[in-house]
Image (spheres, rainbow, N blue to C red):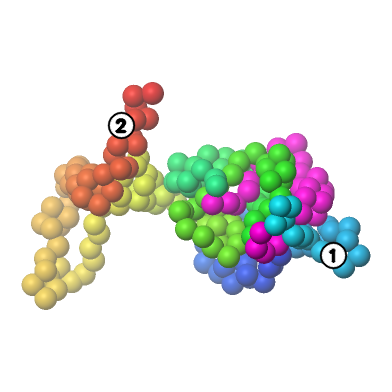
Amino acid sequence: MKIDILTLFEEMFQGVFSSSIIKRAIDQNKVTINIHNFRKFSKDPHQKVDDTPYGGGQGMVLSCQPIFDAVKALKGENTKVILLTPDGVPYQQKHAYDLAKEKHLILICGHYEGFDDRIRSIVDEEISIGDYILTGGEIPAMVLVDTITRLLDGVIKKESHEEDSFHENLLDYPTYTRPRIYEGLEVPEVLLSGDHQKISEYRREEAIKKTKQRRPDLLKEEENEKDK
């Protein structure tokens, strides 16, 4: 997979993409990640990328030209262009699975007071990572790259992400390690039984129980999907 990120702040990505699973995926050629400062695509003599909004208002708005030209320069036949914006579709794990099947993604990071609305005309999807406001789209872009990269073939074991929280719209089951008893708190007996079928059944029951208690909305979403 290839991921191109359009941003004004390349330095924000250095630490995140140079460690852990993402770095390993890059080193193994599972993913190629390119960071582009779209200021370099500006035709303004001073490489200006924003301007005041028509109709007045606070702050500066990102202009069409640099972002349009950046996307044109990077886009290929199998490219999906994604705009990171609070207006977008709420991001979920099933979305990450879909995006992990793509060959090429372009992620556009907004900033300042927003972007010229005509930029929406060149994107395929708009995504939001939550109902809150960030200073820009850089952190959402990192979230997408992290969630997508770990799902690529060979990056981690398939069994690992199939047991993650939100797989099948369930939270993860509780896990334990040594010692067996700590400050009077014991590991459930079934996990010590060696009976893998019983352990599997127990874990699924616990996952459903936790989801009902903490995120019942996830179970409603699953029911709605089945009814469609």
Left or right relative to 138: residue 213: left
Callout 2 amino acid: Glu
User: Dot 1: few (<14), some (14–19), or many (≥20) neighbours within 10 Å?
Assistant: few
The answer to whether residue 1 is above or below residue 228 is below
**C-alpha span from label 2 to label 1:** 51 Å
The label shown at residue 47 is 1
The answer to whether residue 193 is above or below residue 95 is below
**Bounds of the magenta segment:** 57-86
Callout 1 amino acid: Gln
Say whether residue 49 is visible: yes
Observer-side mark, 2 or 1, equals 1
Callout 2 touching callout 1 (CB < 8 Å): no
Residue bearing the label numbered 2: 223
Determine the secondary structure under disc 2: helix
Left or right relative to 81: residue 221: left
Left or right relative to 69: residue 226: left
x, y percentage for residue 225?
37, 30
Which residue shows up at 34% across the image and 27% down it? Answer: 226
x, y percentage for residue 171?
30, 50
The label shown at residue 130 is none
